[in-house]
Every structure is written in structure tokens, then in C-alpha cells.
Amino acid sequence: MRIRKRLDPTIFNLPVEKMRTGYYADQDLCRAQQVLLRDQYHPHVLVHLYQEREVVVCGTDEAIAILKLCSGYPEAEGSWHAGWKELRVMSLYDGERASPGEAVMTIAGDYALFAQLETDLLGVLARRTRVATNTTAVVEAAGGKPVLFFPARFDHHLMQTGDGYAAYISGALGVGTDAQGAWWGRPGMVTVPPSFIACYEGDAVRAAEAFARHLEEEVNLIVPVEGVEQALAVASRLGRRLWGVRLDWGEEPPERPSLPLDLQAVWHLRRALDRAGGEFVRIVVSGDLTPEKIRTLEEVGAPADAYAVGRFLLQGDFAYYAEVVEVDGRPCARPARSRPNPRLSPVE
């Protein structure tokens, strides 16, 4: 049985003081905490955090870190009344699945201890679950072939570290940036950039040689190629220093919109590499890939060894909701939209 272990709260580098004061929160929640404290009212609540879709959950460790480090309220003498030890939190683990309405996390305790954190909690769960669910769909479509997580250029750089972890717990093999692999200790993979090849007058062989000559031996090199001849030339010059060649999905031709990648060219490339002693060279398919496109390639037996996926991994609406289902041990008058989850584990 795999031992499940949560990430240490310090790894997230949270802006603790700002979160405590509600800097990132919807202000109605901050005001609600202030009113409770001024009214000296401390209702003991049970809150469900839940989704309305079938999802692969991620962000629970980050949400727990926010509760551990930021829950509480200011006291009259200017000190901080820490709240974590007064809360009881139950949660799924990152990477587990949840059904619509099923509680992913529950928080029990004085509502004034964590009212100002609701926005932050829902936000990290929504973001990381989006990436984890999308990555899982791609990994399943790839049928065990490596999936490379390459969406960094489609979003703000501060999203990379947590997104990379969400991809990792969902089965992605490689990442494009060091930040994406920071929480699980994997450096970014290296593709020779098309802009760099352009600087060498479009000569992919010269550009790849320069990369191989000046980068460390352990760096896995992927070179984008435009055809069999170019791929063979790169493989001949780099030998086993070459991890793989990359082919783009490309534009979808109107005469065959469901299969825009030239499969004959892919099979031809595989046979040519094998005949030239380059059987170790992986063919990486990239472009605007989706699970549907990957399944299409797998169903026709395309000789793709890995898939580099970008924009799709950040798409979709994966909103979370917080619902108070009990106050001082009594069910709320309004019927709950969420439901209990017997698979939740206590957070120590």
C-alpha cells in the first residue's frame, strides 16, 4: 500500500501576513469576520468544500497549508490568535477523484477563525484541480506513453510551480520549466527553441549541435524537425545525445479534419530512424493536442513515443464552493447542495 504523505506547508512560500488579513479575499468575507469578532459571536460551523463536476482533486495540501499558517484572528493587544489547533479538518489527498457534490474537504470550528480564507481556499483547489483533471484525461488517452507538461507559455509564471505538481500527481512524466518540477524535484526538459534555430539561419542541425556541445550530458534534448531528412541529419550528428524529435500536429486540412497529422510521414520517419540505427530516438508529437486528438493517434497505431501537451491543460471551469451545513451542531435550514464523503481522512 502506498503511504500517502502531505506536502510540508513551508514549501508553498505563502504570503502569510497578507492572507491572514484577507488581502487576497473577497471583502465580504473579511467584513464578515470583523463583524463576528466585534459582535463577540463565535458560531461553531461545519463547512463542506465541493465541486459540481467529476474531477481529479488537487490543491488540498496547499489549502491545508493556508489553514495551518493563516487561520485565526487579531487580538486586542496586537497579537495573533492562531486558529489551526482549534479546527478539525478532513480531506481527500491530492490525486484522488471526487464526484459532483461530494465534499473534497470539511472544516469544523469557530467560523471567525477562517472566514477570511474562503476565497484563497477555493481558488487554490479550483486551479490545481483544473490542471490535475485535464492532465489525467491526457495521460489516460496516451495509454501509458509519456506525457510532457508544456503549458508554461500560456499563463502567468507564478502559476508554474503548483501547476507542475498537479501534473505530476496526475501522471505527467516531464515538465518544461524548473519551476514546474520544484515541488517534486525534477528539472525541466529541453527542446531546442524554433527561435534559436532561426538564429542559425533555420539550420536545425547546427542549432542542435550547439545545444549538445554546451549543455550538460544529463540534459535530455528534444529537437523540432520538419521532415525525415532533417530528423535523420540531427540524429546522425547528435547520436544518443538526442532524446527525441518533435513533430507538430499542424493545421487541420479541410479534406481530413479529424486526422491533420500526416500519419504516413510519421511511420516513414520511424522506419527511417530505425534503419539508420536511431531506434533510440523518440518521436514526440506536440501542437494543440487534446485527449481526443491523442486517442485518434493511438487508435490508428501512430508510432508516437510521447506527447507534449500545452494549452489544453489549463482550460475549463473547475469552480469550488463552500457551504455551511451545520451551525453549533444543528443542520442548516437550507437543504445542502453538497454531501458528506466517507473517504475523507483527518488532517493532523
Image (spheres, helix red, strand yellow):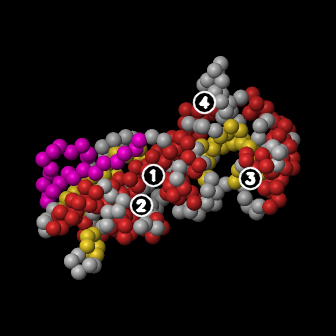
Residue 130 percent location from the top left of the image = 45, 46
Query: Could you tell which of marks 1 and 4 lies nearer the N-terminus?
Result: 1
Query: Could you tell which of marks 3 and 4 lies nearer the N-terminus?
Result: 3
Mark 2 in CB contact with mark 1 (< 8 angstroms) = yes
**Residue at horizontal 22 percent and vertical 63 percent from the top:** 33
Residue 152 percent location from the top left of the image = 58, 51
Q: Is residue 190 magenta?
A: no
**Residue at horizontal 77 percent and vertical 61 percent from the top:** 215
Closer mark to the observer between disc 3 and disc 4: 3
Highlighted magenta segment, given as a residue range = 317-339
| Marks 3/4: CA–CA distance | 27 Å
| Marks 3/1: CA–CA distance | 28 Å
* Mark 2 element type: helix
- In the picture of the structure, the residue carrying the numbered disc 2 is 62
Tag shown at residue 221: 3
Mark 4 surroundings: few (<14), some (14-19) or many (≥20) residues within 10 A = some
| Marks 2/1: CA–CA distance | 9 Å
Query: Could you tell which of marks 2 and 1 lies nearer the N-terminus?
Result: 2
Residue 177 horizontal side relative to residue 129, left or right: right
Count of all numbered marks drawn on residues in the image: 4
> Looking at this view, is 256 or 272 the one in front?
256
**Residue at horizontal 75 percent and vertical 28 percent from the top:** 264
**Amino acid under disc 4:** Thr
Mark 3 surroundings: few (<14), some (14-19) or many (≥20) residues within 10 A = many
**Amino acid under disc 2:** Glu
| Marks 4/2: CA–CA distance | 36 Å
- In the picture of the structure, the residue carrying the numbered disc 1 is 128
**Residue at horizontal 24 percent and vertical 43 percent from the top:** 337
- In the picture of the structure, the residue carrying the numbered disc 4 is 296
Image position of 319 with respect to 269: above or below = below
